[in-house]
């Protein structure tokens, strides 16, 4: 066991982690631990854009952006946080431009902007051009630019280091009224070096989680193989609650059968969704903004067309994205990458043929609860000193029950920066917390048990079963029946997971072992997500219950908070305690979400 | 034909509804993979392993590797993440050419013969298809891959015309996969050469109107291990999964070295 000591340890080197590192690295002794080489992070896959009310091409302001974010999230957004994000969006984009990001330009040489779903002028009057972009490679450019600036500032990376445990200590604190509670404090993390299988302990005053999303819980997903909910699972196992985990965004336009994303930018540039009859069906579901309605509405509309027998393809299993009325030159200029995906992976020529598409698991709105300073909360309002989270792993909550397109690249920049600044600031005065005894015991026991297991279960078999049940039961349509079906399968898989056997017995680059560990994260988080979905007996944003098709503000205008709690038993699920947290309102009263 | 149509006049644009229905089953076929294996923990010798697996329709080489890893031999080791050609993890030699495994469709290969899969060349092999990327990133870091601008920052953005932006568009697409560098015969024989990827990334800044460090980068590249090693074999351009005209970028950098240093 090797021990390292840093003021700040950042876990994850996607957009959020590197944006944090650029701030923290210049102020405090900082290390970035990442299971992937930084430039392999999935931020690089983001296509369409990053929004900010720059008003470069038409009138716009941050207040309209805040409103759209709140409405898009079906009012489950904490409005103070949305306001912070929309205000700081402008500097976030300008910061990136100054770091060198090659945005597309207007004829005057300013940053160009385009339309994106749910972004409107003056509280819903018409679509507004708010998304700053670099062709359909915006995420790639953000990831590269942030990495370049990390190189510039000599940020210290530990590449292919998997963080497998968060070390915290509990301290009893007495309140003014004499009652006591357990206060968590951050001590560091335990990490596994992929190259040689060695375990390292990183002691740190501040730890920033920036580990991204959880797409691999589902079979059809736009997410990378490596997006396995690690950070959420590690926080949860350390006793941190998870907020709004039932809310997953299914992006309307995944390549059918593959899940690879075709950006909403395609519809922003004029592409149209059609059913097997050639009908532009979104006219029926969202008469005003049609194909550019928020993602949850479009995804459900598509799934409904398929359910009602108007799907295209051999099994009537998908709908069609039609770009054929657009000029090929326009497609090439604005959507080069995504049209290439259609060609490469489905053999479809978007100039002349419609592209088969179906909703794909895309984004986790929920995650590790934080306040606007990216400080992690151990309950509804108690901060865990020294622990921060930013990016998709976190829930601030700026996305509520449904994230607007281009708001995540924004989120990772705004809250990544805030996390980096706050973590460095805290470390400048705080003391190190002593590492608990036997800090690596949990990790070593887990890995040794897996290496020694002869149980005969395969990681891939269990993972596939999990993903299939989640696609079948927890996708855009849910009901008590489907949710309980998913829970039963997950419970069975968790038992079988104890018998997972790996074949690679080596120390070097043992990805067989790590895939088994990642499956454990997926199972834990699938269970939390499913239990949260069971408790939310209403439909809101990305969570749609067929047995409760209406939004129910009276009972459910609340964030859900799921705690790991061995003592607790709710609705037949042992070990998870369900609680709620109020939503923060500032300016906007909930209204019906109509487009 | 492709004039934008009005709402009412949108008669199925160019789509033939019957045809887009497709039909029939997804075809399956057998693929034999031969993979170069190496794990110094257990043996100093590399070996070839062979498996035959049944694959479907639009499966790629990466899917076949996964099938082997997940269903037959869990010790088969390779890097991958995004699975659609944007993260740069899985550059490997497939039938002798550098490709991303997630971008090569099996049906585009000659499946009457085994598909040969080896690690990329010129970087130390760590295990199976995984190589040590450190030397590659070292060269990248040496060309100062970040924007340097010495003038005071404006409150808004720095102005750049669409034409100026277009000038370096091609080289912004690089995903640092190393397919180009590890296809270069000069790089194989001479570990010191910066390699095409580093030059591509230098190009991205040298031709960016906002950057002030072009001369410093050109000086670095004018070094004996720099651009002049390139013998214009075009392997790199052929290998690049992002379609970057790598050789052209290197030529442009060579020309810039000449015009600035003379
Ligand atoms: C295809 C696609 C297109 C998208 N397009 C857009 C768009 O146009 N606009 C928009 O706003 N949003 C978009 N999004 C969403 C957005 O890209 C992501 O939400 C965002 O990039 C997430 O960034 P992140 O930094 O939180 O995580 P990531 O970029 O996923 O990075 C996660 C990091 O954590 C590390 N990590 C994970 N687990 C561990 C561990 N156990 N130990 C150590 N390190 C670990 C990984 O190595 C990686 O570096 C898109 C998403 C997808 C999938
Ligand atoms: S230039 Fe092309 S081949 Fe070379 S590293 Fe970049 S993306 Fe890969
Ligand atoms: S897995 Fe990302 S490029 Fe192939």
Image: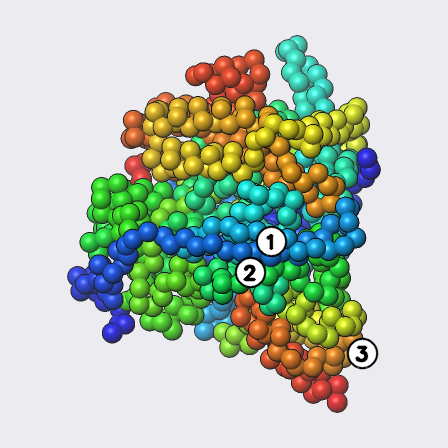
Q: Determine the secondary structure under disc 3.
A: loop
Q: Residues within 10 Å of mark 3 (few under 14, many from 20)?
A: few
Residue appearing at x 25%, y 74% in the figure: B1
Is residue A523 left or right of A28 when viewed as pictured? left
Query: What is the chain letter for disc 3?
Result: B
Do discs 2 and 3 share a chain? Answer: yes
Asked whether residue B213 appears in the rendered view, the answer is: no
In the picture, the quarter occupied by the N terminus of chain A is: top right
Q: Is A144 situated above or below A35?
A: below
Q: Nearer the viewer, residue A213 or A464?
A: A464
Nearer the viewer's eye, disc 3 or disc 1? 1
Q: In terms of image quadrants, where is residue B214?
A: bottom right
Q: In terms of image quadrants, where is residue A235?
A: top right
Asked whether residue B6 appears in the rendered view, the answer is: yes
Q: Residues within 10 Å of mark 2 (few under 14, many from 20)?
A: some
Query: What is the chain letter for disc 1?
Result: B
Q: Is B239 situated above or below B91?
A: below
Do discs 3 and 1 share a chain? Answer: yes
- Circle 2 residue: B114
Tag of residue B50 = 1
- Circle 3 residue: B224
Asked if the residue under mark 2 is in contact with the one under mark 1, i.e. CB atoms within 8 Å, the reply is yes
What is the C-alpha distance between the residues marked 1 and 2?
8 Å
């Amino acid at each position: 066991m090797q021990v390292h000591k840093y003021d700040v340890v950042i876990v994850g080197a996607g957009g959020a982690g590197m944006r944090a590192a650029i701030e923290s690295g210049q102020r405090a002794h900082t290390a970035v631990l990442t299971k992937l080489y930084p430039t392999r992070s999935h931020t690089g896959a983001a296509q369409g854009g990053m929004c900010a009310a720059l008003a470069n091409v038409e009138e716009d302001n941050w207040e309209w952006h805040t409103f759209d974010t709140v409405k898009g999230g079906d009012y489950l957004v904490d409005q103070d946080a949305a306001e912070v994000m929309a205000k700081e969006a402008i500097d976030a984009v300008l910061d990136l431009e100054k770091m060198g990001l090659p945005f597309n330009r207007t004829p005057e040489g300013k940053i160009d902007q385009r339309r994106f779903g749910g972004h409107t002028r003056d509280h819903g009057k018409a679509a507004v051009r708010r998304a700053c972009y670099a062709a359909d490679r915006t995420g790639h450019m953000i990831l590269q630019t942030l990495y370049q600036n990390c190189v510039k500032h000599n940020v210290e990376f530990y590449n292919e280091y998997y963080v497998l445990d968060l070390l915290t200590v509990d301290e009893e604190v007495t309140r003014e009224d004499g009652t006591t509670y357990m206060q968590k404090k951050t001590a560091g993390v335990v990490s596994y070096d992929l190259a040689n299988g060695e375990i390292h302990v990183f002691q740190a005053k501040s730890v920033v989680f920036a580990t991204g999303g959880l797409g691999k819980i589902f079979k059809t997903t736009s997410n990378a193989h490596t997006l396995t909910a690690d950070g959420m699972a590690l926080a949860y196992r350390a006793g941190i609650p998870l907020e709004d985990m039932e809310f997953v965004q299914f992006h309307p336009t995944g390549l059918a059968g593959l899940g690879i994303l075709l950006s909403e930018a395609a519809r922003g540039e004029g592409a149209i969704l059609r059913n097997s009859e050639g009908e532009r069906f979104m006219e029926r579901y969202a008469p005003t903004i049609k194909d550019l309605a928020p993602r949850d509405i479009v995804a459900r509309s598509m799934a409904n067309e398929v359910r009602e027998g108007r799907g295209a393809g051999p099994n009537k299993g998908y709908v069609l994205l039609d770009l054929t009325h657009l000029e090929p030159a326009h497609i090439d200029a604005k959507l080069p990458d995504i049209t290439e995906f259609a060609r490469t992976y489905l053999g479809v020529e978007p100039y002349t043929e419609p592209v088969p598409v179906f909703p794909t698991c895309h984004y986790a709105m929920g995650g590790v609860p934080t306040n606007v300073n990216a400080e992690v909360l151990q309950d509804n309002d108690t901060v865990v000193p020294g622990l921060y989270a930013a990016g998709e792993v976190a829930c601030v909550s700026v996305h509520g029950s449904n994230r607007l397109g281009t708001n995540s690249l924004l989120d990772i920049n705004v809250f990544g920066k805030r996390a980096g600044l706050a973590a460095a600031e805290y470390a400048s005065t705080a003391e190190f917390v002593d590492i608990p005894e036997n800090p690596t015991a949990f990790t070593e026991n887990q890995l040794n048990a897996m290496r020694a297991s002869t149980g005969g279960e395969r990681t891939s078999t269990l993972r596939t079963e999990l993903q299939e049940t989640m696609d079948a039961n927890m996708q855009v349509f849910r009901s008590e029946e489907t949710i309980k079906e998913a829970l039963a399968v997950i419970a069975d898989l968790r038992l079988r997971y104890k018998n997972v056997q790996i074949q690679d017995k080596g120390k070097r680059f043992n990805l067989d072992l790590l895939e088994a560990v990642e499956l454990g994260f997926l199972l834990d988080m699938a269970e939390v997500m499913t239990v949260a979905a069971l408790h939310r007996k209403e439909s809101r944003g990305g969570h749609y219950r067929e047995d409760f098709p209406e939004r129910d503000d009276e009972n459910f205008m609340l964030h859900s908070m799921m705690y790991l709690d061995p003592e607790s038993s709710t609705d037949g699920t042992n070990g998870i305690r369900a609680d709620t947290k109020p939503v923060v309102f500032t300016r906007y009263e909930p209204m019906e979400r109509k487009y | 034909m492709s004039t934008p149509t009005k709402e009412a006049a949108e008669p199925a644009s160019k789509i033939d509804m019957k045809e887009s229905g497709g039909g029939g089953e997804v075809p399956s076929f057998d693929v034999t993979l031969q993979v170069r294996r190496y794990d110094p923990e257990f043996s100093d010798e590399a070996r070839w392993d062979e498996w035959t697996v049944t694959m479907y329709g639009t499966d790629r080489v990466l899917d076949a590797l996964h099938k082997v890893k997940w269903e037959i031999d869990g010790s088969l080791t390779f890097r991958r993440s995004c699975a659609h050609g944007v993260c740069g993890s899985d550059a490997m030699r497939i039938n002798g050419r550098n490709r991303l495994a997630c971008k090569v469709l099996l049906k585009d290969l000659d499946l009457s013969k085994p598909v040969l899969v080896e690690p990329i060349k010129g970087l130390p092999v760590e295990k199976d298809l995984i190589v040590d990327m450190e030397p590659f990133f070292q060269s990248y870091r040496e060309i100062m891959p970040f924007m340097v601008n010495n003038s005071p920052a404006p409150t808004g953005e720095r102005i750049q015309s669409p034409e100026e932006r277009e000038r370096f568009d091609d080289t912004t697409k690089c995903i640092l996969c190393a397919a180009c560098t590890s296809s270069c015969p000069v790089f194989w024989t001479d570990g010191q050469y910066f390699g095409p990827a580093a030059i591509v990334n230098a190009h991205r800044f040298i031709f960016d109107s906002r950057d002030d460090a072009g001369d410093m980068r050109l000086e670095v590249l004018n070094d004996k291990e720099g651009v002049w090693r390139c013998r214009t074999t075009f392997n790199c351009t052929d290998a690049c999964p992002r379609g970057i005209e790598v050789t052209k970028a290197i030529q442009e950098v060579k020309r810039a070295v000449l015009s600035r240093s003379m």
